[in-house]
Image (spheres, grey):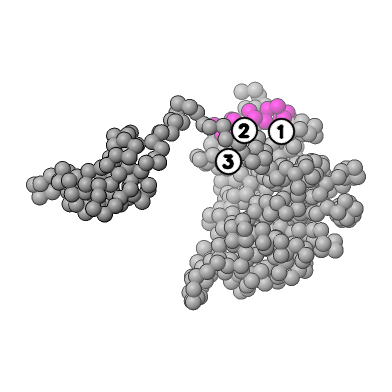
Amino acid sequence: MRRNGRTQGPGARQIYEVLRAQILAGAYGDDGALPSSRALASELGVARATVTSAYEQLSAEGFIHSRQGARPKVAAVLDRTPPASPLLTGPAPLPLSCYGERLALQPVSLAPAVRPGIDFRYGDLAASDFPTPIWRRAILGALAQRQDRLSYGHPAGSHRLRRALQGYLWRARTLRCEAEQIIIVIGSQQGLDLCARLLLDPGQGVVVENPCYPMARDIFAAAGGKVTPVAADQDGLDTSRLARVEARLAYVTPSHQFPLGSVLSIARRHRLLAWAGTREAYLIEDDYDSEYRYDINPVPPLYGLGNGQNVLYLGTVSKTLSPTLRIGYLVVPSNLAAIFTRAKQIMDRHSPALEQEALATLLENGAYERHIRRIRRRMAERRNTLLEGLRYRFGDRLAVEGAKAGLHIIAWFRHIPAALETELIRKATQAGLGLHPLSPLYDAGNSTKPDRAGLVMGYGGLDVRQIKRGVELLADCVAEVESGG
């Protein structure tokens, strides 16, 4: 490098790297002396301080010993054996934990990097639905709250938010609890993981609905649970099949079964609670999208029917505000609040504080519930557009389930066998249409998989125009599959 017509010597970092490589290669022997800082600086044409800085770094990392008035020497105990190249030897067969081994056996399912132009993926929300103005004001208000110091928050979450959620759950879901029973989690996934860690030992049984939310099934399996799928039908989980099932835990979606959309009947709710009481089992009630009801009245949660000692209630704002916020909540029995708080503390200390305060503001001033009423009307319009389009395009060749609530429907194609489901998905992908089959949500080893093609069609992330166009593309793809084209 030249500066002002003169050649500039190497910097301290470059000198350090060259000397380090030479020492590792044995250029100075096992305890040989390096040049003095004065001599090396003169040889390289740099300031003595530059060489001294490089020597100090080598000494700090244990490559050399330095003593004032003497030349630095290579550390006598230095192991210069270079590590084997991973390209030549392959990955070392280091063992995983039992948890890691179980996790390694599970298939990885991630959203594609490039999304289709029109995607009926469940769980997505349209960006235009997010209440940006009121959220911005709430965030700015949280930022403006002057604090004496920045410190870690409470593991269970902001007390202000927990108090606000306590009131909201009573108003919206007739669920009575104390604020201290509420644990703020980073989405429902963390809530389920906490339940699996604290309530389940490897080898113990776990009841899940069949079909069910696959990530829940994966969490319990990774924790070592013996997962038992129990069929769900038009009345929810078939509790008559539980008589001979021994389990420590049951994961259910009684208010809106995922994915079929059925509601657990009151008779089955009482049978499920009785079974759990007899088995001394815990019930996890996932109320993931209870805010969206169209043709039916809100269904009281399972939590309120029991004695409050064995039901854990799981909620989230992922379906009302945004899944990107990563805010959920667990309502746990009062005797479990302390241990869940401790587990949350060692897992990640606490959930993001700023977002908690912003959500508390929306709950306190009524903006959250006003947003839900507004967004429910939009979702109802999208749902009606989808149902009308499917009815017009397919008539009685298609059966729809689960349309009375939530953000998705189930579409059954009467004349397309399950064996052609993959072909339908492939043709849709080629047409720029995202379709999502129902079959992967069934237990892989269970014989109750449907014999006809079924789709989980989410409409929360699409506008009316996209839904209409998506139905047209779907009709074209179905026609090709039915004709064998």
Q: Seen from this angle, which residue lies furthest left? A: 5
Residue at left offset 59%, top offset 30%: 426
Amino acid beneath label 3? Leu
Q: Are marks 3 and 1 in contact (CB under 8 Å)?
A: no
- Name the foreground residue: 89 vs 404: 89
- Name the foreground residue: 381 vs 340: 340
> Callout 1: 10 Å neighbours few (<14), some, many (20+)?
many
**Residue underneath mark 2:** 425
Instruction: Using the rendered view, name the quadrant where residue 327 is placed.
Output: bottom right
Residue at left offset 73%, top offset 42%: 224
Q: Which mark is residue 453?
A: 1
Give the distance between the C-alpha atoms of the residues marked 3 and 1, in whole angstroms.
Answer: 22 Å
Residue 54 visible:
no
Rendered-image quadrant of the N terminus:
top left
Considering only vertical position in the picture, is 266 above or below 43?
below
Residue at left offset 49%, top offset 77%: 148
Amino acid beneath label 2? Ile
**Residue underneath mark 3:** 110
First to last magenta residue range: 412-430
